[in-house]
Image (cartoon, rainbow, N blue to C red):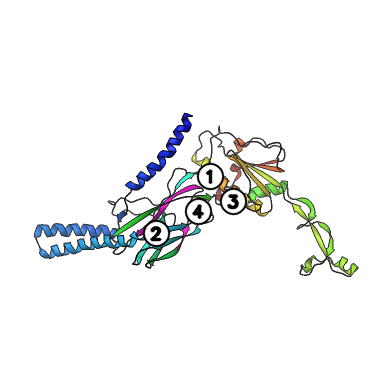
Amino acid sequence: MSSTASSSADNHRKPFLDRLKARLQPPRFLALTRAGKFFILMTIGVGFGAINTGNNLLFLIFGMMLSVILASGVLSEAVLRNLRLRRHLPRRLEAGQPAPGSFRLINHGWWPALSIEASEQNPRCIRGPSAGREVGPKSVPWWKFWRRQTDDERRPLAAAYTLRIGADSDSKVRTHYQLPERGEYKLTGLQLTTRFPFSLFEKSRRFAAPSKVTVLPAALPAEQWLGRLDSRWGDTMKNKRGRGDEYFGLRDYRPGEDHRSIHWKSTARRGEPMVRETEARQRRALLIILDNRAPVEEPAAAHRARFELGIRHLAGLLHSLDRDGYRLQLRSSTGDVSPERPGEIDALLRHLATIELARRSAPPPPEDSDNDLPQSRVRIGFEDVLGAAQKDETRLSFEALPEESS
């Protein structure tokens, strides 16, 4: 009872802290561009010169430079004040691959908005190999005048630029979402940025728009694993007509059918076109057991890299088996997952997206129940934790994967 009460109190406290944090957050975020830093230094220099010499011309120049700074702040605020931002997330995200998305910018003002960039705020990984880490460009302190950033450091999760949005209108701009690693990510919100009018300052406005996305693992070809499965099992017969190689029977020709399926000997004997039917092949139902335990109690970086390589090969294996018509089920220490509909394995890939490498002493995946046994089983993991193969079971180890595939 005490733990339940404390958890409910924490749940009530979180909204209050979120509201307090939102109130304390500044309404705008301002950063100096490189040109702006030089302009500020020049303004300060001219101001000192005017005060020390008393020269009226320097005072005039100093006043004009201050007016430019003031005008820059007023005009940039006029651009951002009446804008609203919405996102349209991609339907499917795969690690390291760009996926199409879009932003919708809405201008409620009586004047157009110029030079606008819409972007996602830095997301945080909440489940997966990068759990707890933030993805995106790091904020640069204002005093680092000549700090150089690489392209990866500058690129947000998704960004799109538009030159102009008309008064009382909206605009849809396309972008690409791209995250480097698999996992479940929390999107904290959206951001509008402008350098209008003089590119001296970069002013940003943030919008709270929490959401979550799941990044699927990038698939690698799994020919080695597929070869082992095909050599052991192959296909079985369904004992009904369908696509296959073995003879099933003859029937009358229907208009529009492929002439290559006509059985000419029977056609000549009967005097009517006859079609040869083949027997369909039955693909096996596979239970894939992923043992996510490491071979040691404290996994090293090499073990984690090998595990990630195995996850990518497993994703490729699932794609290949699904295309070949296998009925799939995935099991790990976190539960069982089956496709929502035949031919759709996104549920299995979402399960792979968030699974993490566990210690050697962690519980293994549960064994089969007696009332629902699949036809065949594939057990995948590190060689030291898989154990001996059972009847009608194939073991695929991470150690056997080629290094160059990573």
Q: Tag 2: Cα neighbours inside 10 Å, few (<14), some, or many (≥20)?
A: some
- N-terminal of the pair, mark 4 or mark 1, is 4
Is 373 situated left or right of 169 in this image?
right
Distance of mark 4 from mark 1, alpha carbons?
Answer: 16 Å
Q: Position of residue 64 (x, y in %)?
A: 19, 64
**Magenta stretch, residue numbers:** 173-194
Viewer-nearest of labels 2 and 4? 2
The residue under the point 38% across, 60% down is 117
Residue that badge 1 annotates:
354
- Total marks in image: 4
The answer to whether any part of residue 313 appears in the image is no
Could you say whether the residue bearing mark 1 is in a helix, strand or loop? helix
The residue under the point 68% across, 49% down is 327
- Are the residues tagged 2 and 1 within 8 Å (C-beta)? no
Distance of mark 2 from mark 1, alpha carbons?
Answer: 33 Å
- N-terminal of the pair, mark 2 or mark 1, is 2
Could you say whether the residue bearing mark 3 is in a helix, strand or loop? helix
On screen, residue 397 above or below 162? above
Q: Residue furthest right?
A: 269
Q: Identity of the amino acid at label 2?
A: Arg
- N-terminal of the pair, mark 1 or mark 3, is 3
- Are the residues tagged 4 and 3 within 8 Å (C-beta)? no
Residue that badge 2 annotates:
84
Viewer-nearest of labels 4 and 1? 1
